[in-house]
């Protein structure tokens, strides 16, 4: 359970001692706007998109939906809402990042240990470099907006940054679900009622809610119940004052890493990061932090994490078949298939498949088992074939 507030807060009001007076506007702050530093996470591989994703070509480098890669789209989006952009990545991807987004600073994480250690490192760097800042965390491999635009993104980010700056809360952006989805985590906002008399009225135009709890990826029945209950998708987008995040992270399992960072010794930092187990920022910090807020976001969003997701964003023919740009599909008695290829593909008498032809490799998998490609990649890694 996160937070103890009983109801939503419209605009800014709060019940914590560090927050502004109830009814004050988070946009007003202290009269000066903080420096917004976008931290773009680009250290993952995206193994479920094998064989397009490989050990030397992570998902964020791919251009599945046009000429620009996921990374290039994300950095351009970040430039529109941030004063500075830092791309956090692993050493083996650093050159590829610099080549694709030369206008962004590249920061190499000490060791790949999931988003908890990665964001601790990046946030500490922001705190060291900027006196008055809000760190804005953006995954590099998500699809935001529709029709080539980013509708609603900038206003939602502006609200979240304002809340983080004014209240010292850790802000997560909750995307309003369009369907029950088993591949995403969910955010439950604190229940309304039990607050002051204006709480119900505030519900109609609230800027943010205290977070009641985070929920892991559910089964279909549970996902349906989450959507019906008004929970949000956890999109992995965050905003926070560096000082607030570092204070919340100063507990196990991240406290030893923070201690090493405070010493300023590179060898200590490297050793600490290499010794810690991988852990997500949700589990390491957000699920146990006291002051976490969710800012509702209605912009189109999708995590193209596996091949079955493409039929949500690609045009389909009369039989529900979809093919990526540059490929040609001819189908006979075949329906609801996804083809990712830059060549000519023919399908006969098959339904519900993802067919991927990339470089010298071909993958065929039922869409309902697209998540299992990650298991295949583990086997390929063991054989030195990934």
Image (tube, rainbow, N blue to C red):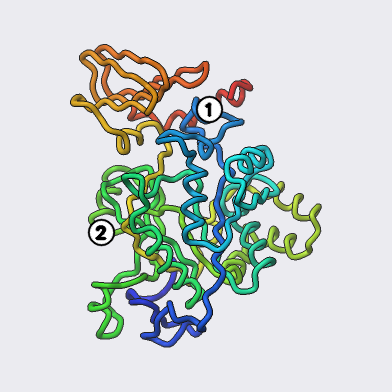
User: Mark 2 Cα within 10 Å, few/some/many (few <14, many 20+)?
Assistant: few
The N terminus sits in image quarter: bottom left
Query: Left or right: where does residue 278 sit relative to residue 214?
Result: right
**Residue extending furthest toward the bottom:** 21
SS type, badge 1: helix
Based on the displayed image, in which of its 4 quarters is residue 333 positioned? top left
SS type, badge 2: loop
Residue 222: x %, y % from top left: 29, 48
Q: CA distance from mark 1 to mark 2?
A: 36 Å
Query: Left or right: where does residue 113 sit relative to residue 63?
Result: right
Q: How many marks?
A: 2
Read off the residue under disc 1: 377
Answer yes or no: do the residues labelled 1 and 2 have beta carbons within 8 Å?
no
**Residue extending furthest toward the left:** 318
User: Mark 1 Cα within 10 Å, few/some/many (few <14, many 20+)?
Assistant: many
Read off the residue under disc 2: 229
Q: Judge whether 330 appears above or below 20 on screen.
A: above
Residue 245: x %, y % from top left: 57, 67
The mark found on residue 129 in the picture is none
Sequence-wise, which precedes: disc 1 or disc 2?
Answer: 2
Kindly identify the residue that appears in the image at 52 percent across and 75 percent down. Answer: 33
Residue 203: x %, y % from top left: 26, 73
Closer to the camera in the image, 358 or 208: 358
Q: Judge whether 25 appears above or below 283 on screen.
A: below
Closer to the camera in the image, 57 or 195: 57
Q: Judge whether 5 appears above or below 385 on screen.
A: below
Query: Left or right: where does residue 115 sit relative to residue 365?
Result: right
Kindly identify the residue that appears in the image at 56 percent across and 41 percent down. Answer: 44
Q: Judge whether 69 appears above or below 169 on screen.
A: above
Kindly identify the residue that appears in the image at 52 percent across and 40 percent down. Answer: 60
């Amino acid at each position: 359970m996160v937070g103890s507030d009983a109801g939503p807060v419209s605009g800014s009001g709060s019940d914590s001692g560090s927050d502004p007076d109830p009814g004050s506007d988070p946009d007003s702050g202290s009269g000066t706007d903080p420096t917004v530093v976008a931290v773009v996470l680009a250290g993952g591989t995206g193994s479920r998109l094998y064989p397009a994703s490989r050990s030397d070509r992570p998902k964020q480098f791919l251009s599945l939906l046009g000429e620009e890669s996921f990374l290039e789209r994300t950095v351009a989006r970040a430039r529109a809402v941030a004063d500075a952009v830092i791309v956090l990545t692993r050493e083996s991807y650093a050159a590829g990042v610099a080549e694709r987004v030369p206008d962004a600073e590249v920061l190499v994480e000490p060791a790949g240990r999931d988003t908890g250690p990665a964001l601790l490192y990046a946030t500490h760097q922001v705190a060291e470099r900027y006196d008055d800042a809000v760190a804005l965390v953006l995954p590099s491999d998500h699809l935001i907006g529709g029709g080539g635009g980013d509708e609603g993104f900038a206003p939602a980010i502006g609200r979240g940054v304002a809340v983080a700056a004014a209240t010292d809360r850790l802000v997560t952006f909750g995307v309003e679900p369009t369907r029950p989805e088993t591949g995403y985590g969910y955010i439950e906002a604190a229940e309304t009622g039990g607050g002051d008399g204006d709480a119900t009225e505030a519900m109609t135009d609230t800027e943010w809610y205290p977070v009641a709890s985070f929920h892991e990826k559910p089964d279909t029945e549970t996902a349906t119940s989450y959507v019906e209950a008004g929970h949000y998708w956890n999109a992995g987008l965050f905003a926070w004052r560096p000082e607030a995040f570092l204070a919340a992270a100063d507990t196990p399992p991240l406290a030893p890493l923070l201690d090493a960072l405070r010493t300023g010794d590179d060898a200590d930092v490297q050793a600490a990061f290499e010794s810690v187990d991988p852990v997500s920022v949700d589990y390491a910090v957000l699920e146990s932090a006291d002051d976490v807020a969710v800012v509702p976001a209605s912009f189109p969003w999708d995590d193209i994490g596996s091949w079955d997701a493409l039929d949500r964003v690609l045009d389909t023919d009369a039989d529900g078949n979809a093919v990526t740009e540059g490929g040609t599909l001819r189908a006979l008695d075949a329906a609801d298939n996804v083809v990712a290829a830059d060549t000519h593909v023919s399908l006969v008498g098959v339904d519900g498949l993802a067919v991927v032809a990339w470089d010298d490799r071909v993958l065929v998998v039922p869409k309902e088992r697209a998540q299992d490609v990650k298991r295949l990649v583990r086997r390929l890694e063991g054989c030195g074939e990934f």
